Amino acid sequence: MADRMRDCKRNPKSQLMFSLISDAIYWTDELPECLKKHEEDALRFILNYRTKIICGIEDDTIKPLWTRATQAFPEWIGFLEERTTRSATLCNAYKKMSSEAEVELPDTLN
């Protein structure tokens, strides 16, 4: 997983997105292709923890995985300072996208 995470390259055209299953925001240039199921699961926790950092929420349950990830692939663009720093703008974007997803979810099931 670490090699694929390091291979992600910053794209100035990347878009901020929301993952309902991760309850997290991410940029489209951060996701490597061909992750195994358990790697996708780990990435979901990493994205969720980062979103909590952005919103200023403490969560010690996921912190060990976050710490291990920052050691295993510190060059990953998802660890850039502007993507891992507390931000009211990004937190508000997360809250908006999360609310929209919750409203749209029931319609998706029809």
Image (cartoon, rainbow, N blue to C red):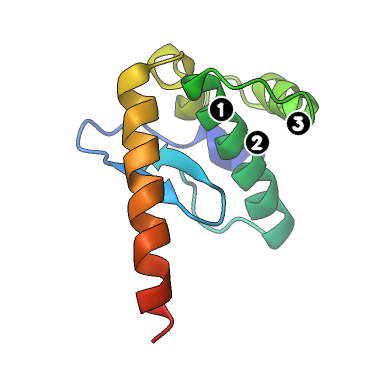
- Choose the circle earlier in sequence order: 2 or 1: 2
- Choose the circle earlier in sequence order: 3 or 1: 1
Horizontal side of residue 54 vs 48, given as left or right: left
| Gap in angstroms between the C-alphas marked 2 and 3 | 13 Å
Q: Position of residue 72 (x, y in %)?
A: 70, 26
Rendered image: mark on residue 65: 3
Foreground residue among 98 and 38: 98
Horizontal side of residue 31 vs 72, given as left or right: left
Tell me the element at label 1: helix
| Gap in angstroms between the C-alphas marked 3 and 1 | 14 Å
Q: Residues within 10 Å of mark 1 (few under 14, many from 20)?
A: many
Q: Which residue is mark 1?
A: 52
Foreground residue among 67 and 63: 63
Report the amino acid beneath label 1: Lys
Q: Residues within 10 Å of mark 2 (few under 14, many from 20)?
A: some
Q: Which residue is mark 2?
A: 2
* Residue 45 appears in the picture as rendered: yes
Q: Position of residue 42 (x, y in %)?
A: 69, 45
Residue 14 lies in what quarter of the image? top left
- Choose the circle earlier in sequence order: 2 or 3: 2
Report the amino acid beneath label 2: Ala
Report the amino acid beneath label 3: Leu
The quadrant in which the C terminus is found is: bottom left
The quadrant in which the N terminus is found is: top right
